Image (cartoon, helix red, strand yellow):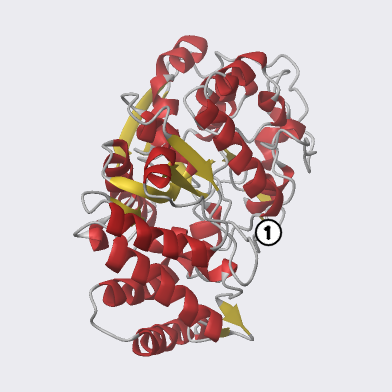
């Protein structure tokens, strides 16, 4: 049971298409209305991917005659709800969104995912092409040969930056982490009304963006089964990330995750925002940032450029009593037709074919910011890795000490050496349990 942490050949890339690892064969006489009259419950994260998918709910219900009951929450609340339902072995949730890079090993070990292999062999529409999905992302959701979910998107943290403010303040687009920090200082001196840099400070959310700093500094989370936050690269990453947020971020940044970051940048109160590529639509909402924004991967550090790239999957609950009806929704949601519609909402598709869809290419070409978004995602797809937190079954728990260290440093409660030592002690105790 193991996920593949480096994502291989993500299908989203406009430069190359990836091949699937398994073949889904169309089931003889496949009938979309086989489960007409049934109801399936979808536990959904109210993020851009979930919201874009739920918008299309009437189309699924019209096609299948299945009623889709949507149970939506913000990310942390969604996970709390899922844990409660799954620990009770309840059948009240049929499908749920999942991040294999975060909880894949943990959920697989707990037996929460239904194995999709049988459905892929016996209940597939003739136009559903598994080979068209990213092979790497399918592999990341496969444990002991069992397919536990199929991908909905491709994403990673990118830098949204105000071209006009950088030009006004005489700041060149940063090409290294050192230049990014120096540019933030120059922006602060130039315009005190705008936060020079913002990213995630909220403890559970911070590892997603911090991980890129760690890897670009040349660090890794674990070596020889020991936590490495106190390594020279680990301390450099903790120090720089927390310093950027403490010295150049907005007040209260320890409570910031993607909703607050996108709103701050969209409203013109941040010069640089390091946040998920998924937030393109939220950042551009209202149009104020359409013509002044550039997008790029985080600049390289001493360790080079090693971006994070992950993706949400859609999975069927092992406790569902309507597994095949739930699979029909999963199949529909990850189909080319639906992925093409979600792509026009700014959801980067995990299907190679969508990248060459004329409507999607036209949408990309309409605005320079979209072209920069696609270029940044291609860079992430080519070189990115999906290690966010520790590559252990307790990955979700491993994120808490990382976030705690970052929070303590932003608030000035500890030195880097103290914060990393306390975090390493907690993390080594977690690692030792496996």
| Residue 132 vertical position relative to residue 222 in the rendered view, above or below | above
Query: How many neighbours does mark 1 have within 10 angstroms: few (below 14), some (14-19), or many (20 or more)?
Result: some
Q: Position of residue 193 (x, y in %)?
A: 21, 49
Q: Residue at x 58, y 75 (%)?
A: 219
Residue 323 left/right relative to 411: right
Residue 391 left/right relative to 29: left
Q: Residue at x 49, y 53 (%)?
A: 112
The N terminus: image quadrant: bottom right
Q: Position of residue 118 (x, y in %)?
A: 68, 38
Q: Position of residue 215 (x, y in %)?
A: 58, 68
Residue 180 left/right relative to 190: right
| Residue 1 vertical position relative to residue 22 in the rendered view, above or below | below
Query: Residue 105 appears in which quarter of the rendering?
Result: bottom right
Residue farthest along the top direction in this orientation: 62
Can residue 79 be seen in the rendering of this structure? yes
Residue 135 left/right relative to 427: right
Q: Residue at x 64, y 86 (%)?
A: 224
Q: Position of residue 345 (x, y in %)?
A: 47, 25
Q: Residue at x 34, y 72 (%)?
A: 406
Query: Residue 313 appears in which quarter of the rendering?
Result: top right
- In terms of secondary structure, where does tag 1 sit? loop
Q: Nearer the viewer, residue 173 or 290?
A: 173
Total marks drawn? 1
Residue bearing mark 1: 6
Q: Nearer the viewer, residue 397 or 85?
A: 397
Can residue 312 be seen in the rendering of this structure? no
The C terminus: image quadrant: bottom right
Q: Nearer the viewer, residue 411 or 6?
A: 411
Q: Nearer the viewer, residue 72 or 14?
A: 14
């Amino acid at each position: 049971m193991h996920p593949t942490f480096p994502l291989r050949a993500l299908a989203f890339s406009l430069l190359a298409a990836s091949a699937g690892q398994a073949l889904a064969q169309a089931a003889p006489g496949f009938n979309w209305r086989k489960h007409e009259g049934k109801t399936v419950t979808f536990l959904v994260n109210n993020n851009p991917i979930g919201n874009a998918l739920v918008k299309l709910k009437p189309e699924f219900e019209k096609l299948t005659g299945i009623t889709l009951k949507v149970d939506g929450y913000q990310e942390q609340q969604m996970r709390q709800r899922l844990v409660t339902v799954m620990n009770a072995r309840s059948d009240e949730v049929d499908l749920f969104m999942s991040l294999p890079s975060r909880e894949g090993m943990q959920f697989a070990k707990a037996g929460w995912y239904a194995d999709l292999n049988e459905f892929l062999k016996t209940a597939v529409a003739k136009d559903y092409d598994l080979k068209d999905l990213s092979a790497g992302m399918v592999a990341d959701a496969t444990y002991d040969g069992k397919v536990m979910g199929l991908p909905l998107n491709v994403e990673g943290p990118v830098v949204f930056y105000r071209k006009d403010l950088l030009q006004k303040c005489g700041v060149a687009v940063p090409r290294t982490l050192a230049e990014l920090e120096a540019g933030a200082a120059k922006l602060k001196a130039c315009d005190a009304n705008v936060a020079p840099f913002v990213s995630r400070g909220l403890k559970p959310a911070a590892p997603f963006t911090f991980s890129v700093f760690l890897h670009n500094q040349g660090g890794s989370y674990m070596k020889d089964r020991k936590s490495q936050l106190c390594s020279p690269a680990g301390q450099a990453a903790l120090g720089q990330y927390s310093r950027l947020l403490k010295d150049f971020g907005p007040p209260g940044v320890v409570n910031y995750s993607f909703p607050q970051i996108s709103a701050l940048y969209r409203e013109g109160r941040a010069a640089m925002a390091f946040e998920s590529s998924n937030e393109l639509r939220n950042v551009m909402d209202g149009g104020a940032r359409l013509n002044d924004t550039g997008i790029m991967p985080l600049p390289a550090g001493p360790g080079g450029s090693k971006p994070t790239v992950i993706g949400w999957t859609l999975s069927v609950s092992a406790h569902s009593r309507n597994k095949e009806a739930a699979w029909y929704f999963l199949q529909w949601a990850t189909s080319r037709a639906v992925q093409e519609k979600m792509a026009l909402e700014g959801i980067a598709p995990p299907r190679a074919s969508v990248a060459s869809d004329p409507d999607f290419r036209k949408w990309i070409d309409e605005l320079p910011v979209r072209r920069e978004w696609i270029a940044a995602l291609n860079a992430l797809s080519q070189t990115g890795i999906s290690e966010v937190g520790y590559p252990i079954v307790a990955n979700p728990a491993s994120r808490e000490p990382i976030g705690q260290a970052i929070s303590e440093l932003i608030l000035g409660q500890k030195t880097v050496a103290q914060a990393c030592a306390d975090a390493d002690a907690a993390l080594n105790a977690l690692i030792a349990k496996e």
